[in-house]
Amino acid sequence: MAARTGNWIKRLELVEKAWKVLDKYNDGSVTMEDLMEVYDVSLHPDVFAGKITEEEAIMEFAKQWDHDKSGAITQNEFIDYYRGVSNSIKDDEHFEELIKAAWKLPDDDAVDDGLYGVGRSRPVTEPPPKITADEEADNIQLMLRKRLEVLTGFADVGTQAYKVKQYFKKYDEDGSGDLQFPEFDKALVEILAIDEESSARMLAGRRALFDRYDRDTTGDLSYEELADGLFRLKPHPLADVESRRLMEKIRNGIVTSEGIYGLRYFGFNLRTMDDQKFGYVPVDELLVCLKDVNVHIADHEKKLLLKFFDLSPHPKGTVDITEFMRGIRGKFLKSRIALLERVWREKIAPTGAQKVPMGEVIRLIDFTHDPDVFTGRLTMEQAIRDFPDLWDKNLDGFINWHEFVDFYRDISAALESDAHFEMILRNAWSFTFVETNTVKTIGRRVLVSLKNGHKKYVDFDVPEDEYFNPDDLTFMRKKLFLRGVKDVLMVHDAGLAPEKHKTGATSRGIVAEQALGYGSMRAG
């Protein structure tokens, strides 16, 4: 008899838990149909590895499990099968992951959360800890990597990367060679065996993970982007908590110091410094530029910059300009891209042209709403003179769709509200968005308790696909601070905000609100 490895008593408990999931009627036997209803055969290691088909795996089960050819599987046959599997697996954790993946077993209820200890319940008066969409994405990525390790038999990263591409290809329903979010999401839910309740709760995290992997922000995820992001084959600043905080610090610092066009001018100035067009700048020169806009970088933060942006084949000690700007910009919401598509299609290129002459674009844009023109720093003629440098990246005398989006990507990063972003487009292009086609928002109201004992209601217009959680105190304090509400003690959800009559606020008034008090980084 072969010597068993690992803790068979512990493993047997898991096998018996799986049997209880199968034996719905508690009669000591199940049919093959019962078994296949629960077992996800696509996650069988040999099926996942492409060695056998799903049909072959089912036939293998029937031969291996139904010893007496009765058409039913008994508990003893079930345990005998996994006793044999156990003999070939040394690591208890590997065996546990295998069983949980195959039979969709939940984690143990008695979990030590580091605060209350195993077996102690959290007080009912204290809400569970809340996490952001990016933190949820971190958790999902960790779950996915662990699952893939089990399914590939703890293969090397290169093998896992290859296998994950093959697996996700099955969900490429339109055969485009790329994954759109619904396809990516379906694959994630199935491979992680996420139940319906958890699926709804984790949706924002799965969306954040898709956006994180979609490095070129096309809305289509290539298999290379998926493998690079999942296995960190290429460093990604949004996949690291400390790096995300640093990116937010830099972005907020530039916007606070230089206004809504600050990121655009900052990127322009970095590329001007790169006079040889190598695509990089020495990290110390970058730190000087950041210091000029009142962003001070500590030594440990400098190391983070080099970790994520010191990329080959550039010389050591340099920062890739494109990747750095992409990092501090953060995400570009699809709702805002949809607004840009309307302006481009209906105002700038109504004939379907791929690019539009610079002179035609200058004729269409209203420079009176440029913040520097509005505040008197520049004349309209000077703003028009600067326009090609800020927009025409390939210097061909035309503006194409990608250059158009790239400009507003910088503007979008400086604006929290979709309404402000829409107003900027409306002002600049004299464009009227039909109300039914604008981004849908939900009016939310919260009751804020202040440290001085006072309470007040605050209303928010929240885009449908945007994270908003009144129970997330850190998140709400930041949102309220941006609305001028400080010294917040507690926040309570007060439901939907009362409907309000929409008045026609003047464009000039909102532009003044955004322009006054902002500096400028225009070259020259």
Image: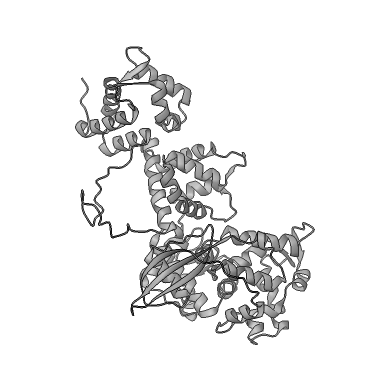
Q: Quadrant of the N terminus?
A: top left
Q: Is residue 85 left or right of residue 251?
A: left
Residue at x 58%, y 79% (from the top left corner): 514
Q: Is residue 375 left or right of residue 324?
A: right
Farthest residue toward the bottom?
376
Q: What colour scheme does the image use?
A: one colour
Q: Quadrant of the C terminus?
A: bottom right
Front residue of 134/355: it is 134
What number of labels is visible? 0
**Residue 124 can be seen, yes or no:** yes
The picture places residue 68, in percent across and down from the top left corner, at 32, 12
Whether residue 262 is situated above or below residue 330 in the rendered picture: below
Farthest residue toward the top?
69
Q: Is residue 106 left or right of residue 55?
A: left
The picture places residue 298, in percent across and down from the top left corner, at 38, 73
The picture places residue 94, in percent across and down from the top left corner, at 30, 37
Front residue of 101/276: it is 101
Whether residue 464 is situated above or below residue 23 in the rendered picture: below
Front residue of 389/174: it is 174
**Residue 403 can be seen, yes or no:** no
Front residue of 371/278: it is 371
Farthest residue toward the right?
351
The picture places residue 444, in percent across and down from the top left corner, at 49, 64
